[in-house]
Each structure stands twice: as structure tokens, then as C-alpha cells.
Image (tube, grey):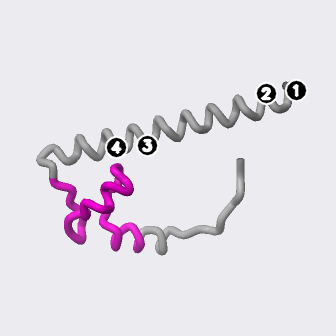
Amino acid sequence: MNPFTRTQLSDLTRAMDARDRQLRDEIRDALVQSGDQKYIDLAGEIHFKRLLANPAAVRCIDCQGRIEKTHAHEAMPRL
């Protein structure tokens, strides 16, 4: 394997590890915040199906949609 490819694979592995750690931390934080097993957002409960899809969800689907529309930015491709 050439050095360039080895470097790219190493960078990709580090990025994937960082993403996995961030997701793990988000899930842990969501569980800590929900000590009473209730997931509450400003608009109400976060539905179970949403939590199945994204266990670290901190907003109901409606609030998340509003946040994404409000804070939308131009896509900037990057590796």
C-alpha cells in the first residue's frame, strides 16, 4: 500500500472513531438527562419511533425540523 493511501485510511479511521465517540456521548447524555425515563422537548414528548431511529435525539421531530430550517446553511463539501 502506498503512503498516500495509508494516510487517507488512517485519517478516515480517526474521523470515524471521533464520530462514534460523539454519538456515544450524545446517547449517554440523553440517558442521563432522562433520569425519569421521560424524553421531553418544548413541544412535548419525543416519540418512541424517533428514539429508535436516533437514540440521542433531544428534540421532537417538529422542533428538530424548525431548528434545521432556522439554522440551515449552505452545504460545504469536505473530507
Mark 1 and mark 4 lie on one chain; the one further toward the N terminus is 1
Q: Amino acid at mark 2?
A: Arg
Crowd tier of the residue under label 2, counting other residues whose Cα lies within 10 Å: few below 14, some 14–19, many 20 or above: few
What number is the disc on residue 2?
1
Query: With respect to residue 33, does 11 lie above or below?
Result: above
Of the two numbered discs 1 and 3 in the rendering, the one whose residue sits closer to the viewer: 1
Q: Residue at x 41, y 72 (%)?
A: 65
Q: Give the CA separation, mark 1 to mark 2.
A: 6 Å
What number is the disc on residue 59?
none
Tags 1 and 3 touching, CB below 8 Å? no
Q: Is residue 60 magenta?
A: yes
User: Position of 2 compared to 26: left or right?
Assistant: right
Q: Magenta part of the protein: which range?
A: 38-66
Pointer 4: what residue? 27
Q: Position of residue 76 (x, y in %)?
A: 69, 60
Tags 1 and 2 touching, CB below 8 Å? yes
Look at the numbered disc 1 and give the secondary structure of its residue: loop
Mark 1 and mark 3 lie on one chain; the one further toward the N terminus is 1
Q: Position of residue 69 (x, y in %)?
A: 48, 74
Pointer 2: what residue? 6
Q: Amino acid at mark 1?
A: Asn
Q: Pick the residue in front: 41 or 3.
A: 3
Crowd tier of the residue under label 4, counting other residues whose Cα lies within 10 Å: few below 14, some 14–19, many 20 or above: some
Q: Residue at x 30, y 62 (%)?
A: 49
Q: Give the CA separation, mark 2 to mark 3.
A: 26 Å
Pointer 3: what residue? 23
Q: Amino acid at mark 3?
A: Leu
Q: Give the CA separation, mark 1 to mark 3.
A: 32 Å
Q: Residue at x 70, y 33 (%)?
A: 11
Q: Position of residue 43 (x, y in %)?
A: 24, 71
